[in-house]
Amino acid sequence: MKALLIFLILLSSGCSHLKNPDLWSTADKVLLGTAMTFKTLDYLQTKEFNDDDNYYETNRYLGRHPSDNEIDLYFGITALGQVVVAHFLPSTLRKMWLGGWVIVSADTVIDNHSIGIRIRF
């Protein structure tokens, strides 16, 4: 949420690179797709274990046992925020921003999997 607030402040300050974002490279698009894939997997894992009393959420913004609506809202807002911020960053920072989200989300999905949280289809 802090990143989104910083982005809005920069946007309103008239920074020229925010008004005229760099074009997205293939690498940018692949990083975005990868970040959103891991975010989706994290979302599905969170929805899967939310009704199980053996597990609890460790994300401080969601609380230990969030409602389905809170999960949907959190993941929707954070996904949108990640894309909006990425769009307005210059190319080099965009890659770092999206790469960071790939690492964070992949780590979360791997941790969830290691404690037994699976996604059932």
Image (tube, rainbow, N blue to C red):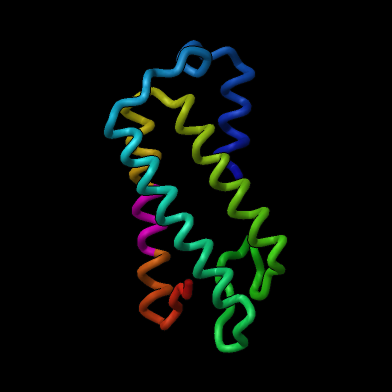
86 or 50, nearer to the observer? 50
Q: Kindly indicate the quadrant of the structure image that contains residue 4.
A: top right
Q: Is residue 58 left or right of residue 101?
A: right
Q: Is residue 112 magenta?
A: no
Q: Position of residue 115 (x, y in %)?
A: 41, 82
Q: Position of residue 79 (x, y in %)?
A: 54, 46
Q: Is residue 63 left or right of residue 88?
A: right
Most common SS among magenta residues: helix
Q: Is residue 1 above or below residue 45?
A: above
What's the residue at 56%, 40% (across, down)?
Answer: 81
Which region of the structure is painted magenta? Answer: 101-107
What's the residue at 69%, 66% (across, down)?
Answer: 68
**Quarter containing the N terminus:** top right
What's the residue at 48%, 24% (across, down)?
Answer: 88
Q: Position of residue 37 (x, y in %)?
A: 41, 52
Q: Is residue 83 left or right of residue 102?
A: right
**Residue lying furthest bottom:** 54
**Residue lying furthest front:** 121
Q: Is residue 24 above or below residue 2?
A: above
Q: Position of residue 93 (x, y in %)?
A: 36, 30
